[in-house]
Amino acid sequence: MVTLLALAFAVWELANAGTPFGPPKLLVQPPEEVWFQLDDNLSPHARPTLKCQASENAESFVWFKNGRPLEVGGDIEWVRAGQSGTIQFVRPRRHHEGYYQCFVSNIFGTAVSNKVHLRLGGSFI
């Protein structure tokens, strides 16, 4: 009985010490649509960006495009790699159009963002 009480107390201490248990929770995710234009000279603030941020217990971020794993690199970069799952399109191209979704995982499970439609638009004013 004493061992059971000690174990219960230890679990309570861990839970109240801020130790995150359970799957990650999404804190920031992209809107349902992001529009972009074709322009090689976009400033970093004007580049299409898909945000995905999760609770501190996130271990991995993976993006999918049209239901398939997305290879991040080249024209697509991680923003603060290892700290968030946010990606940015450095040189947006027509082939970047599609539906994107962020998956955030740890040993307890996976959180999935809403789908975002990255769309090519006309000129922006």
Image (spheres, rainbow, N blue to C red):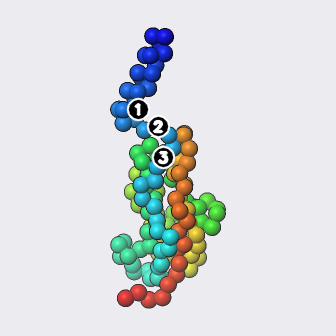
Could you give the CA–CA distance between mark 2 and mark 1, rounded to whole angstroms? 8 Å
Residue lying at 39% horizontally and 78% vertically, measured from the top left: 42
Between 113 and 38, the one nearer to me in the picture: 113
Label number found at residue 15: 1
Q: Does residue 69 appear to the left or right of 29 in the view shown?
A: right
Between 79 and 18, the one nearer to me in the picture: 18
- Measured as percent of width and height from the top left, residue 19 is found at 40, 35
Q: Amino acid at mark 3?
A: Pro
Residue lying at 44% horizontally and 16% vertically, measured from the top left: 5
| Callout 2: SS | loop
Between 26 and 9, the one nearer to me in the picture: 9
- Measured as percent of width and height from the top left, residue 108 is found at 54, 40
Residue lying at 45% horizontally and 10% vertically, measured from the top left: 2
Q: Splitting the image into 4 quarters, where does residue 57 fall?
A: top left
| Callout 1: SS | helix
Could you give the CA–CA distance between mark 3 and mark 1, rounded to whole angstroms? 15 Å
| Above or below: residue 39 compared with residue 88 | below
- Measured as percent of width and height from the top left, residue 119 is found at 53, 78
Between 15 and 84, the one nearer to me in the picture: 15
- Measured as percent of width and height from the top left, residue 118 is found at 52, 74
Q: Amino acid at mark 1?
A: Ala
Residue lying at 58% horizontally and 69% vertically, measured from the top left: 99
Could you give the CA–CA distance between mark 3 and mark 2, rounded to whole angstroms? 8 Å
Query: Badge 1: few (under 14), some or many (20 or more) residues near its Cα, within 10 Å?
Result: few
Q: How many numbered badges does the structure rendering display?
A: 3
Q: Residue furthest top?
A: 2
**Sequence order check: which comes first, mark 3 or mark 1?**
1
Q: Amino acid at mark 2?
A: Phe
- Marks 2 and 1 in Cβ contact (< 8 Å): yes
Disc 3: which residue: 24
| Above or below: residue 30 compared with residue 10 | below
Disc 2: which residue: 21
